[in-house]
Amino acid sequence: MLDDRKKQILKAVVEDYVLSAEPVGSKSLINRHRLKVSSATIRNEMAELEEQGFLEKPYTSAGRIPSDKGYRSYVEDLLEIGEMSESQAIAIRSVFSDSIIELTDLIKKAATVLSQQNDYVSVALTPRYADSRLKQVKLLMIEPGRALVVVVLAAGLVKDRLVRIPDQISGEELGRLGEAIEEGLAGKKLADITLVAVAGAAADQAIPDAVLNQVVYEAYISIKQAEHLEFYIEGTHRLLKQPEYKDVDKAHRFLQALGEEKTVAGYISDLHEGGGEECGEYMVRIGQEIALEGFEDTSFITSSYCVNGDVYGQIGVIGPRRMDYGKIISQIRFINRAINEASSDAAR
Amino acid sequence: MLDDRKKQILKAVVEDYVLSAEPVGSKSLINRHRLKVSSATIRNEMAELEEQGFLEKPYTSAGRIPSDKGYRSYVEDLLEIGEMSESQAIAIRSVFSDSIIELTDLIKKAATVLSQQNDYVSVALTPRYADSRLKQVKLLMIEPGRALVVVVLAAGLVKDRLVRIPDQISGEELGRLGEAIEEGLAGKKLADITLVAVAGAAADQAIPDAVLNQVVYEAYISIKQAEHLEFYIEGTHRLLKQPEYKDVDKAHRFLQALGEEKTVAGYISDLHEGGGEECGEYMVRIGQEIALEGFEDTSFITSSYCVNGDVYGQIGVIGPRRMDYGKIISQIRFINRAINEASSDAAR
DNA sequence: AATTAGCACTCACTATCCGCGAGTGCTAAC
DNA sequence: GTTAGCACTCGCGGATAGTGAGTGCTAATT
């Protein structure tokens, strides 16, 4: 589709623009890249690239900037993902050095370092546990009327929740009830567990129905809550460093769009839904490709991370389209590997 | 110190400036407040107020804006804190209507609503639990090598932490160990619990020393972590709506300063250290009074909330000096009361 | 036929200038 | 003590001109 020289020029334009944030012209291209042709030739080539939709001009007599299509083909064909610089690797590794045992903390840390390294916003999603299997349920009396429900999944997740319960029930009764529920439901997929199933498992206890029902209900909610995915956003303020957000209103609109956490989380989660993808595979979504209100001028770079090879969540970077795709992708890969190691470490 | 007319003028200047964000001049003051004197008189009075340091001029021929001292005396003498409008009350109450049982969630919600209502940043600190007494310690086996430590304080806090433990120890051993620790330490103040104390309580168990030590250590850390205060910041992006942050660099510097969570949290916590203050008392810190880098142009309005009458944390609002002090103070009071009710509700 | 030199043209950006208007301080009259 | 009047200040918004990096096109060159 594109001959070699056009590719070379497109690549150069993208990379210069990523660096400078300013439309790049024919002369400065030559200067920076030591091309062996004249600026007029470049101009002709750039005009053609524009016709084909890879480049665009912000106004009649300015340099060119990449279009969505231009970025897309850059990411797909032209980009060579190098190794990270040693200094980056060290910075990232140092974050993972203290042994962290909760998956959630690990993911948060990863997102933080990703944002710090790039001055973009980073996001992280905890895994979807709907397909994961229940392993343990504990009911712990805290004081009369209050109990702690602890839910443990086979995938390693431990989650708990403080609930109100009737005063009448005793600590031992509560404990036995927990055991009964655990026995009845252990091994089932989270998605398959219903309120009726919990009630069934808890059925033959010598506890008044009214009391039992309330506890069963709370246990059910707690189990269901384990499957909720959580969403973290990190480094929103760093985005203000980017020249594209020198306009406060634009920055504000964007931050507001980011505030719609559920929308964003859902979008990213769906992106990686397809399944069958390998751990650490990344996806890039550029500008208009993102069908979300308020993200027309941004790009997403997201990736699934794995824990124990089967459960996975997502981690990613959101920034202006003018991102250093190569740098970020190599970092995301690296971080993915780190998560994998650290988690298999922790889980076993 | 100030005669009545000066007070009236100062009050009017502050209130106009809060509303308009623009220096207020003598004529517009008259228009807006229907004063019965001429603009020349106002000018003379304002000149004196400036000499005494209550007002200042951004440049030679502009209107006046309040100085730190002006705001201070406004807050201290001039401000009448009215009741909130019914619509505000409804908005706030609706947030607290769903019964929330974890204190942390309650506080977060409170901070969120505070920020939403005012378009400022809100902050919240969980209580300092150092003086609180330990009530329960549970050790729960999750799988060989991993355990959950649950710590319950008399003040109602429940906190847990996933830890790594030696493979050799069994579930029953772990449970017994937990009971021993609980028995040995229950009733003690968190601040008084040392590693040695934990080890002492766990001493006469039939478990190899090496194994025991590791578990004891993790238990100790978990207990200690219960006393850490947590800090929440909410609504940073809303600040971009304020005209004082139309300059991106200024906004960025401020958000960066806010990012120093420990510094800010420590400052606010110390502010309310004195003790002996009633629940719901608020403090106002204006501009230079805040001895923190990067907060010269901002004000803090903070308040201690109480849970069960003795433990307390802080909640507050951070914004430009030009804040609607009256509105915020009345809201903070209201929210404080709501926290109090909801928590005494939940805790008992 | 592809490349390049040359040139006229475009257009954002910056600086400068100017008039407007809301504000001030001061003086003198009330 | 208050106020009317007035000269003065100064930020702000709009107009204007110059600059420079960029373009597209044409004609000459390879």
Image (cartoon, coloured by chain):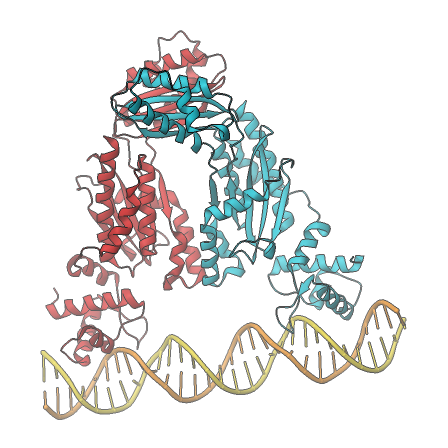
Chain colours: A cyan, B red, C orange, D yellow
Report x, y in % for residue A113: 52, 42
Residue drawn at 65 percent across, 48 percent down: A326
Give the image quarter of residue A310: top right
Q: Locate the N terminus of chain A by quadrant.
A: bottom right
Name the foreground residue: B266 vs A130: A130
Quadrant position of the C terminus of chain A in the picture: top right
Front residue of A270 and A56 = A270
Numbered disc total: 0
Locate residue A130, reporting x and y percent. 51, 32
* Position of residue B96 measured from the top left corner of the image (x, y, whole percent): 28, 43
Q: Is residue B193 visible?
A: no
* Residue B138 against residue A73 in the figure, above or below: above
**Image height of A5 relative to B156, above or below:** below
Q: Is residue B10 visible?
A: yes
Of B97 and A153, nearer the camera is B97
Q: Name the residue rendered at 70%, 54% in the picture.
A: A73
Indicate whether A119 appears above or below A54: above
Q: Residue at x 61, y 50 (%)?
A: A285
Task: Give the camera-side residue of B39 and B238.
Answer: B238
